[in-house]
């Protein structure tokens, strides 16, 4: 459950970043190349008999990075 919660938190942070933290945003979730690459790295890094603690730790760290970095400008989708 903690791994799922960590993923949900990260997805929410990534979504908010993608919509520039707009409170009334209605947008499609954007899977950026950086996010896809990061998930791949996490999954290759967290291996072994009990990968969940590693996955949770790395996902929480990724979430922290997303919510504390400067917002990136986005071009509106028409």
Image (cartoon, rainbow, N blue to C red):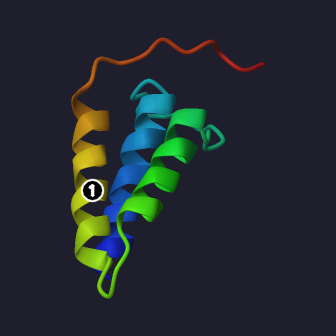
* Quarter assignment of residue 14: top left
Count the marks: how many?
1
- Decide: few, some or many residues near mark 1? Use Cα within 10 Å; few <14, some 14-19, many ≥20: some
Q: Residue 47: percent from the left, percent from the top?
A: 38, 73
Dot 1: what SS? helix
**Furthest-front residue in view?**
48
Q: Residue at x 29, y 85 (%)?
A: 50
Comparing 39 with 63, the one in front is 39
Q: Residue at x 50, y 29 (%)?
A: 19
Residue on which disc 1 sits: 58
Q: Residue 33: percent from the left, percent from the top?
A: 60, 35
* Quarter assignment of residue 13: top left
Q: Residue at x 22, y 74 (%)?
A: 53
51 vs 18, left or right, is left
Q: Residue 71: percent from the left, percent from the top?
A: 36, 18
The quarter of the rendered structure image containing the C terminus is top right
54 vs 37, left or right, is left
22 vs 50, left or right, is right
Relative to 6, residue 51 above or below: below
**Furthest-bottom residue in view?**
49
Q: Residue at x 32, y 77 (%)?
A: 51
* Quarter assignment of residue 26: top right
Comparing 6 with 36, the one in front is 36
Q: Residue 42: percent from the left, percent from the top?
A: 40, 57
């Amino acid at each position: 459950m903690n791994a799922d919660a960590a993923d949900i938190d990260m997805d929410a942070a990534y979504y908010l970043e993608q919509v520039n933290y707009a409170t009334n945003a209605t947008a499609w979730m954007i899977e950026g190349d950086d996010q896809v690459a990061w998930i791949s790295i996490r999954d290759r890094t967290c291996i072994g008999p009990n990968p969940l603690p590693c996955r949770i730790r790395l996902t929480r760290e990724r979430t922290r990075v997303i919510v504390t970095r400067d917002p990136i400008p986005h071009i509106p989708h028409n």
